[in-house]
Amino acid sequence: MNELYKIGEFAKKLGTSKEFLNYYDKQDLVKPYWKDEKGYRYYAPAQWVHVIEYFNLQKIGFSQTDAKNLLENAGKEEWIAQLKQQKETIAQQIQNLQEYYCEAAQMQEALERTKAEHSFTIEYLENYFFCTEPKEPAEEQHRNWKHCPQLQHFWQYVKLSSPASDKLVKGNHKRIWGSLTNLPQRAFSDAAEIPLPAGNCFCYYHSIKAEYDKNGTYLTDNVWNFDEPLRKMKECRLQHGTDLFQQRLALTHEEDGDYVQVKTVIPIRECQHCDKIMN
């Protein structure tokens, strides 16, 4: 008895709580070593390791069932195989988190640019592709931001019929939706790709007032507005090609209504003014 600990003492040594040990008891993970006639529970020093093993396995992503199976039934070979597989899973999660972090940082930077006033940069892009979706959603789906926030981060690709165009009007363009990537098409076997012209791109950050249809469900067509960045390029004496790209960053709720925060990317045909503009 001198080598056994009451549940409170054992929890304190583990740095946890009685509730935590009660949970492990109910789940048949680590049960008390002994119960006296009054129902008081006692734990042996060796059970310290059992609690830590369960805790560590669950901490690195094993389910409660899998952790129990490993500790109670698995031999060394199965341990190695399971840990190898879990390590690969964690590595993929880390990669995903890094991508999410970069996306959040880029979105924050872009939104900060649209917060005070419209702004633009000239950035050099290369080895980027516009990948269409395997099954292109209907335009109505892309306009339904009000009820489908997961659609916010799609890119729109517009092909103008002529680089002389300074606005989008009926008949002078076509548009599709997808995403930008620096990976070649082989990474997207079901997607078609459109390579971006490598070189300097005019990147314009702005807000577009959101207007809804009579049912208040869909955004009206003014969300596809390229007029302002095209006008700004003309003011800066920058010539564009026929490829235009636009990313919807977020739908924000302001005092005077909803605004779509956008980033427009337009490859520049001639850039003799670029250094002067940026300086």
Image: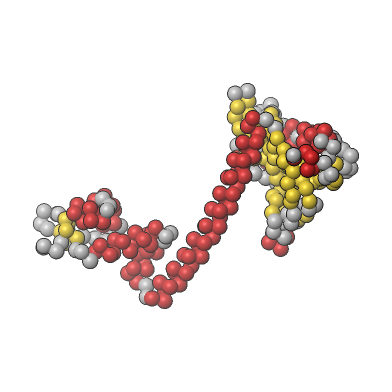
Query: What residue is drawn where x is 56% and y is 53%?
Result: 98
Give the number of callouts.
0
Q: Nearer the viewer, residue 230 or 190?
A: 230
In-image side of 10 versus 254 (left or right): left
The colour scheme is secondary structure
* Residue 53 pos. (x, y %): 33, 64
Q: Is residue 271 above or below residue 62?
A: above
Can residue 65 be seen from the camera position used here? no
- Residue 85, horizontal then vertical, whole percent: 48, 67
Q: Quadrant of residue 263?
A: top right
Residue 120 in sight in this render: yes
Residue at position x 83%, y 45% in the image: 271
| Quadrant position of the N terminus in the picture | bottom left
Q: Residue furthest top?
A: 256
Give how far across and how far down residue 193 sits, in percent. Answer: 76, 55
Residue situated in front as seen by the camera: 107 or 167: 107
Q: Check the image and report above or below for 212 versus 192.
A: above
Q: In this rendering, would 99 be left or right of 220?
A: left
Tell me the quarter of the picture where residue 149 sits.
Answer: top right
Q: Residue at x 71, y 63 (%)?
A: 186
Q: Position of residue 212 (x, y in %)?
A: 68, 29
The C terminus lies in which quarter of the figure?
A: top right
Q: Residue at x 14, y 64 (%)?
A: 3
Query: In terms of depth relative to the viewer, which is nearer, 200 or 80?
Result: 200
